[in-house]
Image (spheres, rainbow, N blue to C red):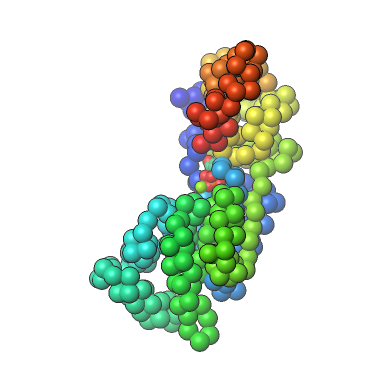
Amino acid sequence: MYEAFYGFKENPFSLTPDPKYFFFRKDHEEALSHIIFAIKQGEGFILLVGGVGTGKTTISRVLIERLGNFLYTSLILNPFLTETELLSSILWDFNVIPSGTTKKELIDQLNKFLLNEVAPSGKRALVIIDEAQNLSLEVMEQIRLLSNLETDKEKLLQILLIGQEELAKKLSNPLLRQLNGRISTRYFLSPLRKKEVKEYIEHRIRIAEPRVKIKFTKGAIKEIYKFSKGIPRLINMICDRALLAGFVKGSTTIEKSMVKKAKRSLVGEKEKKFEKIVSGKKGIKGLLSLFKRKSIIDFKIS
Ligand SMILES: Nc1ncnc2c1ncn2[C@@H]1O[C@H](COP(=O)(O)OP(=O)(O)O)[C@@H](O)[C@H]1O
Ligand SMILES: [Mg+2]
């Protein structure tokens, strides 16, 4: 909506996990190099955990971009699947048309592909499972069994599990003890620190190539941090609205008041309700009911 006003080539704060916008702050860079190292070492299981919107999916895209030539990759984005659906998806991603329908047939087919095509090529085969906290226990167990596919020298299939904090909790379930024990690399991704927020915003704006100089004032950045707690997804959401507020005012300097306006437009209605309940008679019970229905936190991070 405001792209033409600032002369952007595209929206700088879109919510897609576009590797082009990747900001190499220390934690993200570290996560990426840990994962790349683990893949090159041939480790069977790698885990990347972080809160919603911290940049996990983006890291997986950058990883594929970086290692694309060195890898056969399968990217599983919908983990609500059965064991046979999982196996078929992996085969399709590896450009193998599943010929069987039973678990055994599919595993045999996968094994054949890994032995006959992947192993001689010197490349590696990686299955990335995003939102892995949603996998059922049965599918998790199946995934563990897949990592048994190996030659006498090395693992044939490597698995990168990506998920929210619940994933780490889920893995501590005694039923998943064996899988948990096999995870050799674990990385916990944290939100941006206060001082990284400004650089992040400037970085994304630069990539979108505006034709005018855009400035976020110190007060604006402080307000963005207060709202987002450094979570990139929330930073994108509020910056997008703040740029809109700047456009409405005809200003290329984004001030605190515009960020506040942006914040109100994002959570305004929810917040009003929140304040009314806190100050009203319903007190803490009313507050709890608000959180139960669709919490402010859910709203912000979903
Ligand atoms: N390091 C980063 N550099 C640039 N943008 C990022 C970074 N981390 C996250 N983002 C942006 O934040 C948003 C949410 O990131 P995403 O990878 O979808 O988070 P998650 O998968 O952890 O929920 C996306 O728009 C993404 O482009
Ligand atoms: Mg994601």
Which residue is pictured at 47% across the width and 63% down the height?
140
Query: Which of the 4 quarters of the picture holds residue 260?
Result: top right
Relative height, residue 302 to residue 37 (above, below)? above
Q: Please say whether residue 136 is visible from this viewpoint.
A: yes
Q: Is residue 76 left or right of residue 269?
A: left
* Relative image position of residue 218 (x, y in whole percent): 73, 27
Relative height, residue 214 to residue 24 (above, below)? above
Which residue is pictured at 56% across the width and 74% down the height?
42
Which residue is pictured at 49% across the width and 24% down the height?
2
Task: Ligand 1: give its quadrant.
Answer: top right
Q: Is residue 1 left or right of residue 221?
A: left
Front position in the image: 1 or 126:
126
Relative height, residue 144 to residue 130 (above, below)? below
Query: Which of the 4 quarters of the picture holds residue 274?
Result: top right
Front position in the image: 75 or 44:
44
Front position in the image: 81 or 261:
81
Residue sticking out furthest to the bottom: 152
Q: Please say whether residue 199 is visible from this viewpoint.
A: no
* Relative image position of residue 202 (x, y in whole percent): 64, 36
Which residue is pictured at 72% across the width and 41% down the height?
193
Q: Is residue 211 left or right of residue 149?
A: right
Image quadrant containing the N terminus:
top left
Tally of marks: 0
* Relative image position of residue 26 (x, y in whole percent): 70, 51
Query: Which of the 4 quarters of the picture holds residue 76?
Result: bottom left
